[in-house]
Amino acid sequence: MRTKSVKQNRINVVTLGCSKNVYDSEVLMGQLRANDKEVVHEEEGNIVVINTCGFIANAKEESVNTILGYVEKKMQGEVDKVFVTGCLSERYKPDLEKEIPDVDEYFGTSDLPNLLKALGADYKHELIGERLTTTPKNYAYLKIAEGCDRPCSFCAIPLMRGKHRSKPIEELVMEAQKLASNGVKELILIAQDLTYYGLDLYKKRNLAELLRALSKVEGIEWIRLHYAFPTGFPLDVLSVMKKEPKICNYLDIPLQHISDPILKSMRRGTTKAKTNKLLKDFRAMVPDMAIRTTLIVGYPGETEEDFQTLKDWVKEMRFERLGCFTYSHEENTHAFTLEDDVPEEEKQNRANEIMELQSAISWQLNQDKIGKTFRCIIDRKEGNYFIGRTEFDSPDVDNEVLVDARNFYVKIGDFVELEITDAADFDLYGRPLN
């Protein structure tokens, strides 16, 4: 027999997937708080909103399992209502309604007003920049655009997020000012493609102008760039990065592959020669830049020769940061018409090989940091260590600097000068100088 939950009208928002979903959940929570609703993030509540990811197979599986878990709790009377939103729901709503009918309602990625209505709240248009942040107080994501116009063969994001839509500079500056007033010191700019920013609103790539405007926001000390597309990269961005101390010497540019036949099939609009020239330009203009990239292995038709080309290139480029994914065969994408001909085990073996190469490169690069001093921001404390980052590291995906809390004290949220005393593959160890 069902027993009603004791936590009445407490809304628990559960976030899955990427930083863009984190941002969307924070906006939802800000709206709910403005409607005087009690809202929590991944804690107990009798009403649950699951913000799902539908990008690749593993993410979809995690989303479905999370939905099923909360539906089970609903059946047992531990929660009263379950709502599902986000990319998985946008992409597969009819299937989900049929397969998991016990969810109270499904919403897509642009259904925020309707979701709020289902939760007994009104959508407040005046809440530009108002969010309930879920990240550590010192940094926050700033989504500068939604959707994507790129034709990449393997990617389902345009199916779930629609066409590229930039936010006006004035609106983003206002949002940054509100975040700064709440103690945020680092902005992490996110979009499906940062380099496309402004083409729809200003009829030109306008990321450089946005960066100049955000650099003037008092209280913001670091601005970090995530997810830049290589084709048509606006090099004036690098000029701003070089001149403006607030812009971190860091760029996340997912290159995906380097073999020309694979790049062509992926519809990336570039070649190995063009990519190498772009990276050479980056290094020439901003020599201290840390470049993060992501690669896909096991794409349809990827031969041993293609993979060897990729491995040789990873060794040659010595990226400061690198992640690797196995190809996921996604329906309704252009690549879905191709035969998914690389066995799953081989995909994983290739990914492991790439990450072993990168681990060795990262270890070597980290050894060079021993004895040097870096300005770091302290994010949190875990066990016996304070955890910080240099300007060359983004949260959750990059290296961290560990400070032994048994010997030293640093304040969470502060910038601290740390001397690197030791280094591993993906971690640095430091001691404060002040």
Image (cartoon, helix red, strand yellow):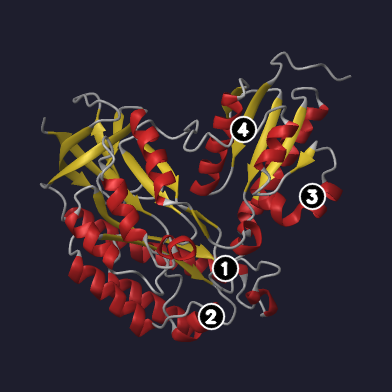
Q: Are marks 1 and 2 in contact (CB under 8 Å)?
A: yes
**Residue 195: x and y, percent?**
40, 64
In this view of the protein, which residue sits in the foreground, 296 or 22?
22
Q: Is residue 325 left or right of residue 281?
A: right
Q: Earlier in the sequence, mark 1 or mark 2?
A: 2
- Disc on the earlier residue, 4 or 2: 4
Q: Nearer the viewer, mark 2 or mark 3?
A: 3
Residue 263 vertical placement versus 314 (above, below): below
From this viewpoint, which residue is outermost toward the right? 1
Residue 269 visible within the image: yes
Labels 1 & 4 near each other (Cβ < 8 A): no
Whether residue 40 is situated above or below residue 294 in the rendered picture: above
Q: Three-letter amino acid code at disc 4?
A: Val
Please name the amino acid that badge 2 sits on.
Glu
The residues bearing labels 3 and 1 have C-alpha atoms spaced at a distance of: 24 Å
What residue type is disc 1 on? Tyr
**At x 32% / y 41%, what residue is drawn?**
186
- At 38% from the left edge and 75% from the top edge, which residue is drawn? 311
**Disc 4 versus disc 2: distance between alpha carbons?**
40 Å
Q: Amino acid at mark 3?
A: Leu
Q: Please name the residue that numbered disc 2 is placed on.
A: 302
Per the image, the residue denoted by label 1 is: 327
- Label 1 residue SS: loop
Residue drawn at (65%, 52%), measured in percent from left and top? 87
Which residue is disc 3 drawn over? 96
